[in-house]
Amino acid sequence: MAHLWRPRRPRPGRAWLPHLGAFASGGLLYLAFAPIGWWWLAPLTVAGFTLAVRAAYAGRVMRGQRRPWAAAGWAGFWFGLAFCYTIFRWVDVIGVDAMVALGFVEALYFVPLGAAVASVSRLRFAAFWQALLWVGEEFFRDRWPLGGFSWGRLAFSQTQTPLTKIVALGGAPLLSFATALVGTVLAALVLRLLKARQQRLDRPRVGWAGAIGWRGSLGWLGAALVLPIVGSLVPIQTTAGKPVELAAVQGDVPRTGLDAYGQAFAVLDNHARVTEEYAQQIAAGKAKQPVALFWPEDSDDVDPYANAEANAIVSNAVAAIGVQTLVGAVVDVGADKAKELGIVWDPNTGPGATYAKRHLVPFGEYIPWRAELTKYFSEMKLVPRDFVPGTTPGVLTVGGVKIATVICFEVAYDDMVRSSVQGDGGVLVVQTNNATYGWTDQPAEQMAITQLRAVETGRPVMVAATSGISGYIDASGHVVAETRQFTPAVVSAEVTPRTGQTLALRLGAAPEWVMMGLGLLAWAWAAAAGRRRKRLEAAFVTAAEPAASDVHENVCDGAVTTVSNSGAQADEASVKAVSSLPAPVDSSASSVTVSNARKAHP
């Protein structure tokens, strides 16, 4: 008898099933990004994430456990771990400890996302609020800590898809929202099908159309399908100018990894040699004369202002090509500081206008808490000095062509690109150094991000990389020409500068702030509604408890009054809380009343 009356415990396998589903979804999301680029997996994995965190939440409620949001948060954490340790695995070039730390910190952002997505699933139009929460997660991850880490946003998986052109309307946040919305709508449809199946099991006479609620389902399905249609119809919103010939030099580096720039003069010599060979091809009529030339970031790691030999090498190469060249150089600032510059080098007058990199890479270009961290992590000593960030947007004129320029990781940050392009440069130029991460996913991921920036800004893009991938991307985001990694090469193309601003540039960060705010408000509303529901359930359960031998219930006109033998009434506030609903008469009626209360107060 004791065995028969022992309450059943939930099977551990079933309790962990949502967490395993979340982990699998996170691993699959990596495949949506370059270099693999199975973009259609992005909305599918969002759907898997939504179903997993909801199931984790509901499972804890059914087991009668407290804090169901914690289970949803854990499911989100497993999703984040699987995704971050795959999408950021190229960081292990710096060190396994760096990859472990970065992956763990980034995975933490999916904990509140999981709790929030599960919480708002109780609201009407839940799919809409859930998609907004993805924008909120990316909003904070892109900014904090230490300036944030913008890699791995949903938008960056949609570089050439039916949704891509939406980025020109509201930037990367709007594209992330659209991608997430397709996924959350798919999750909502799956839930409708499961609910309809259960209804048909309970009431076989009910048809599938009635059980599913075909009107609501078609409405949500239409909302998901209209996004790709809108995306495909968005035109290029900028105005084409006169085509010009531009070129980018990829000089290559002596070796890969952290010591890629161990021979600074060798890297400089490589870029000077490729430039001079290109000049010879022009003189022989085998190549077109460009109006401007672009060298990559770190093409000159020896301060050309302070070192006469480096200055001479750059000057001779620029004189050979005969056009202004944007040179990526490291310039000393005092004894222990430096700046990453893009210098406009004239063949006659030498160095001129400059752009200083503004968004520096923590632990790569500067070490936070240097004194403390270097005691425990030997890799920190590989960055002997901290770089100083610039303060002004990258707006320069090279060879008569007004350009907007960003350096390396800056291309992944909305405000860096937007502020430079708002100077009305006709061409976006990205100077980058990917040599440290050669033969990893990082160069392809950065190239995909750059493609998206071309569509967002309505500008053609010239990419100059030390070791690859260099290339030319037109204003529609298509890669017209690109190089192989670790191969000296020149990308030359007839480029059409474009002027004007897309709607995304005009709106700036406003859409992201609005979507983030709405998502947080929906989460707060769902949490408050949940607390109200719990208080009501507690009041009904208290009022419906079986009376003791000396307690009886009087029911009059739908109101419940509990009276003891002494004739004292129960607390008047408790009576008012349930006076508007029918009184439960037994334990089964109590459960029905609680169910009705849930419907009345969602």
Image (cartoon, rainbow, N blue to C red):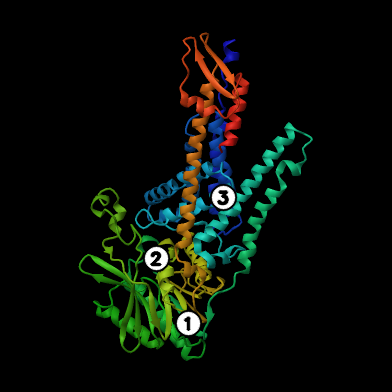
Q: Which amino acid does label 2 sit on?
A: Arg
What separation in Å lies between label 1 and label 2 (alpha carbons)? 28 Å
- Furthest residue in direction left, as rendered: 335
Q: Which of marks 2 and 3 is in front?
A: 3
Image: 145 above or below 343: above
Query: Residue 234 at what x, y percent from top left?
Result: 60, 69
The one nearer the camera, 563 or 323, is 563
Q: In which quarter of the image is the N terminus?
A: top right
On the question of residue 260 being in view, the answer is yes
| Residue bearing mark 3 | 46
**SS at mark 3 in the image:** helix
Report which residue position mark 2 lands on. Answer: 255
Give me the residue at 61% from left, 31% from top: 596
How crowded pointer 3 is (Cα within 10 Å; few <14, some 14-19, many 20+) is rated as: many
Q: Nearer the viewer, residue 120 or 7?
A: 120
Type of residue at label 3? Val
Are there few (<14), some (14-19), or many (20+) residues within 10 Å of tag 1? many
Nearer the viewer's eye, disc 1 or disc 3? 3
Q: Where is residue 365 in the image (x, y as percent from the top left)?
A: 32, 62
Answer left or right for 445 relative to 595: left
Q: Is residue 32 visible?
A: no
**Could you tell me which residue is drawn at 49 percent across and 42 percent down?**
115
Q: Earlier in the sequence, mark 2 or mark 3?
A: 3
Tell me the element at label 2: loop
Q: In terms of image quadrants, where is residue 355? A: bottom left
Question: Where residue 23 sits: x, y (%)?
Answer: 53, 43
Q: Residue 246 carries which label?
A: 1
